[in-house]
Amino acid sequence: MSTQDEALRAVEASLDRPSAARVYDYFIGGTTNYAIDRIFAEKVRERLPLMGEYCRTSRQFLGRAVRQSVREGIRQFVDIGSGLPTAGNVHEVADDERPDHDTSVLYLDNEPVALAHSQVLLADTADEDRHQAMAADLLQPAELWDRVADSHVIDVRKPVALIVNAVLHFIKDDQDPDGILEFYRKQLAPGSLLILSQMTNENPVDDNERQALVDIIKYYESTTNPGILRTKAEFERFFGGWPLLEPGLVYAPAWHPDGDTVFAKAPSESRVIGGVARKPQA
């Protein structure tokens, strides 16, 4: 059986419950989702009407962070918990910013359905010499980093932009995100960038939104990825004290907004925080 056939079988076997990756894809306007995902997404939207805009905010932040990373001299990207290839993939944004096409991207995900979709879709859109998708789990950092080091697309001796975008709200504190992020920070070469974002429960506009955010976390317990929300103070520790690129850890729409940025006029309404930090030179 070919790799693509195996991937398609994995997709077919995943349709018994919503996939957080496919729900996210649906919210940002993608097409790699199924009825079970759309039904769940609409249940979420009933409780939190702007959920789709929050997801778009995360995706837009990723794109702007990748562009800025390229401008900062980064040519390698490792996207952990990359989810489904969809509009604004890291390799597409990087190639758009660097017409020489001298950037490399490694996508990593532990969810079989996300990896399966990645393998199917990257076959049509990517350059196999520079772009690759493989199975790996954020929560198993040593094994994951071995795969990065053994890949033919990333040279871990050189600076890398390590991306963990819209993922940490699926990692609860009892899963040791602090130790895991510390491990990854230690592996990165000096000059590397760390791109992080997640949904926040800070400063809800009213009691209804505060309760809605609690309810959404309960809803996600029935998916492949239960979650947790964090404040800025709770989230900033994941950067390990590295200096943050301007404008620091902010609501994502306030991070180098452009003409397409959702919530650009009211960043705090986005429910998404994010930032990019640089590893100091030794």
Image (spheres, rainbow, N blue to C red):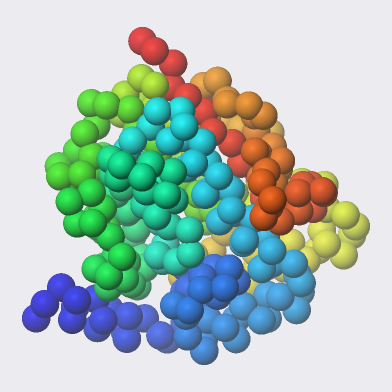
The answer to which image quadrant residue 189 occupies is top left
Q: Where is residue 197 in the image (x, y as percent from the top left)?
A: 57, 45
In the picture as drawn, the residue positioned furthest to the bottom comes out as: 35
Residue 207 visible in the picture: yes
Query: Residue 188 versus residue 204: which sits nearer the camera?
Result: 188
Q: In this view, does 90 lie above or below 251?
A: below
| Residue located at (40% from left, 65% from top) | 85
In the rendered structure, the answer to whether residue 214 lies left or right of residue 280 reads: right
Query: Residue 17 versus residue 120: which sits nearer the camera?
Result: 120
In the picture as drawn, the residue positioned furthest to the right comes out as: 206
Q: Where is residue 66 in the image (x, y as percent from the top left)?
A: 47, 42
In the rendered structure, the answer to whether residue 259 lies left or right of residue 141 reads: right
Q: In this view, does 264 lie above or below 244?
A: below
Q: Position of residue 265 (x, y in %)?
A: 82, 48
Q: Is residue 107 above or below residue 11?
A: above
| Residue located at (39% from left, 21% from top) | 191
| Residue located at (23% from left, 49% from top) | 130
Q: In this view, does 236 lie above or below 134?
A: above
Q: Position of residue 270 (x, y in %)?
A: 73, 53
